[in-house]
Amino acid sequence: MPHRGEEAMGLLGYIVNFRIGPKSQNPRECILYFPGYDSYSEASKLIGRKVAWPVGERTHRGKIVATHGKKGHVRARFRKGLPGHALGTQVEIIG
């Protein structure tokens, strides 16, 4: 019997935007979208999973910390801030 969220291993998603406020943006937190996870309840199953954004041989690693809205987006906090050209690129669930 598969563990909770085991089918999500290797799932690819997209970086939609950085988390922003009225006067600032936080490059350590990003809003991600995973196709097939289109509701709040489905996206909440991804909380706690580890994600990686590949950059050549090195990767930026982060963790999904919360949902964002009601349409299946999630918020991920990375160890180091992502560069601006990461927007629109793919991330992968690694754990």
Image (cartoon, grey):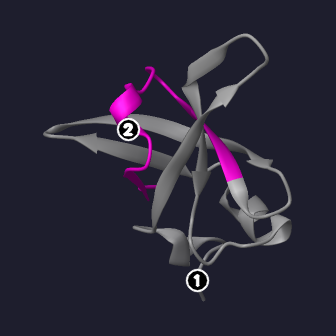
Residue farthest front in this picture: 22
Q: Which residue is pictured at 13% across the width and 39% down the height?
A: 57
Which residue is the site of mark 1?
Answer: 2
Q: Which quadrant holds residue 61?
A: top left
Horizontal placement of 38 versus 11: left or right? right
Q: Which residue is pictured at 68% across the width and 51% down the height?
A: 74
Which residue is the site of mark 2?
Answer: 86
Residue farthest top in this picture: 23
Residue 25 percent location from the top left of the image: 63, 18
**Between residues 25 and 75, which one lies in front from this camera angle?**
25
User: Looking at the picture, which amino acid does disc 2 mark?
Assistant: Ala
Instruction: First in sequence, mark 2 or 1: give its number.
Output: 1
Horizontal placement of 50 versus 24: left or right? left
User: Looking at the picture, which amino acid does disc 1 mark?
Assistant: Pro
Residue range (magenta): 74-95
| Marks 2,1: beta carbons within 8 A | no
Disc 1 secondary structure class = loop
Disc 2 secondary structure class = helix
Q: Which residue is pictured at 69% across the width and 25% down the height?
A: 20
In the rendered view, tell whether residue 58 sits above or below residue 35: above
Q: Which quadrant holds residue 5?
A: bottom right
Q: Which quadrant holds residue 55?
A: top left
Residue 87 on the magenta segment: yes
In the rendered view, tell whether residue 77 sits above or below residue 24: below
Residue 29 on the magenta segment: no
Residue 28 percent location from the top left of the image: 54, 23
In the rendered view, tell whether residue 75 sits above or below residue 35: above
Residue 40 percent location from the top left of the image: 83, 64
